[in-house]
Image (cartoon, helix red, strand yellow):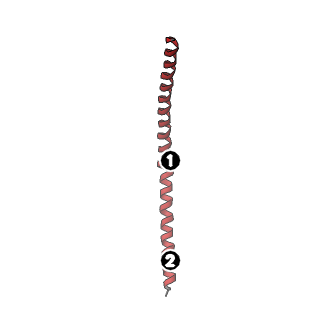
Amino acid sequence: MPSDFDQTKRKLDEAASKIEQELRKVIRTLNNEVVPKMRTEGTQALRSVAQELQKLADRLDDSKKSATQQK
């Protein structure tokens, strides 16, 4: 008959194994679904910001030209 220690050890080993399996699933989900989506959405956000910065730079250039022409 297994001792209490042996039973507890077995239960802890089983729990650790289940935790490892769940962690593998989480990592797989992150790698397969979350990371690619973040990369796609991240690049789209950067492109959008770049466009807005380009517009701001154009407005600043236009303001400089207007100020220079008024002098």
Of 41 and 68, the residue lying toward us: 68
- Residue 6, given in percent of the width and then of the height, sits at 51, 82
The residue that mark 1 highlights is 35
Count of residue discs: 2
Mark 1 or mark 2: whose residue is earlier in sequence? 2
Residue in the image at 49% along x and 74% along y? 12
- Residue 15, given in percent of the width and then of the height, sits at 48, 71
Residue in the image at 48% along x and 26% along y? 56
Amino acid marked by disc 1: Val
Residue in the image at 49% along x and 49% along y? 32
Q: Which of marks 1 and 2 is in front?
A: 1
The residue that mark 2 highlights is 10
Residue in the image at 48% along x and 33% along y? 49
Other-residue count near label 2 (Cα within 10 Å), few / some / many at <14 / 14–19 / ≥20:
few
Task: Using the image, determine if residue 31 lies above or below residue 2.
Answer: above
Q: Is mark 2 on a helix, strand or loop?
A: helix
Other-residue count near label 1 (Cα within 10 Å), few / some / many at <14 / 14–19 / ≥20:
few
Q: What element carries label 1?
A: helix
Which circle marks residue 52 in the picture?
none
Task: Using the image, determine if residue 30 lies above or below residue 3.
Answer: above
Amino acid marked by disc 2: Arg
Q: Residue furthest bottom?
A: 1
What distance separates the C-alpha of mark 1 from that of mark 2?
A: 36 Å
- Residue 8, given in percent of the width and then of the height, sits at 49, 79
Tell whether label 2 touches label 1 (CB within 8 Å). Answer: no
